[in-house]
Image: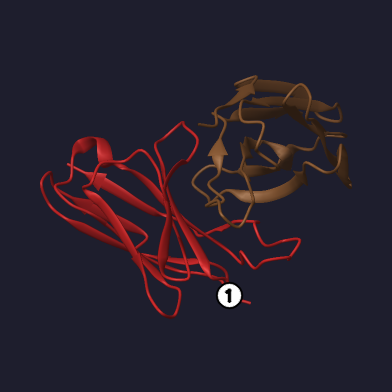
Amino acid sequence: GENVEQHPSTLSVQEGDSAVIKCTYSDSASNYFPWYKQELGKRPQLIIDIRSNVGEKKDQRIAVTLNKTAKHFSLHITETQPEDSAVYFCAASTTSMDSNYQLIWGAGTKLIIKP
Amino acid sequence: DAGVTQSPTHLIKTRGQQVTLRCSPISGHKSVSWYQQVLGQGPQFIFQYYEKEERGRGNFPDRFSARQFPNYSSELNVNALLLGDSALYLCASSPRASGGSNSYEQYFGPGTRLTVT
């Protein structure tokens, strides 16, 4: 089955700097890769996702890149702000109608933005 | 628009008891998934239901069961509770409509925090 590994487990960056979180996956059939942000005691919130037919997607200060050959994808946050502090999870899934769209999650990265 | 709702918010049970957790998906969403999130870890997939049928099951014992109703709401049942079942139980809904570009995006409810003593 699918396995998703996420690094680093903790990332501390200066406010205004960039942050990069990396994930690798094992199942070449996976074709949907969302990123979730979870603040303490709250639900995971979808912040950006990418499908396997594109290599990069941007949304304001957030971008995700996907390398299907190497089976890894990354989250990039530029101009970090204090409100970016949270735990970030990557996930992978297949999206064929025969599949169950089961999300397999990474272990999470605690992002700390230092003022 | 109302998001995914879950009830109850918090629950305390003792070992051996049974618990039922409830989830109402976003209006128009036909798929509901259940996840268990232990403190400090990522969510673990338990079940997915689509059109009232089980479409996927994670690596959880038979003490865990679920169902989806005609209005697409869902219940998760856990029997013979163990201390290790203490966790945040998350429900996620998605449209899962064929051909839709957003059909597999999953949106989470606030969760039910279950404490087993």
Q: How dense is the environment of label 1, judged by Cα within 10 Å: few (below 14), some, or many (20 and up)?
A: few
Query: Where residue B117 appears, x then y in whole percent?
Result: 17, 41
Q: Which residue is mark 1?
A: B2
* Letter of the chain in red: B
Please, what secondary structure does the residue beneath circle 1 have?
loop
Image quadrant containing the C terminus of chain A? top right
Q: Is residue B47 left or right of residue A21?
A: left
Query: Where residue A24 appears, x then y in whole percent?
Result: 67, 24
Can you name the residue that lies furthest to the left here? B16
A80 relative to B7, above or below = above
Q: Residue at x 32, y 60 (%)?
A: B66
Q: Choose top left, top right, bottom left or bottom right for residue A63.
A: top right
The colour scheme of the drawn protein is by chain
Observer-nearest of A92 and B43: A92
Q: Residue at x 61, y 30 (%)?
A: A27
Give the total number of marks visible in the rendering.
1
Q: Amino acid at mark 1?
A: Ala
Q: Residue at x 53, y 70 (%)?
A: B30
Observer-nearest of B52 and A18: B52
Query: Where residue A13 appears, x then y in whole percent?
Result: 76, 23
Query: Is residue A61 in sight in this rendering?
Result: no
Q: Choose top left, top right, bottom left or bottom right for residue A12.
A: top right
A95 relative to B27, above or below = above
B116 relative to B95, above or below = above
* Letter of the chain in brown: A
Can you name the residue that lies furthest to the front here? A98
Query: Where residue B75 appears, x then y in whole percent?
Result: 33, 65
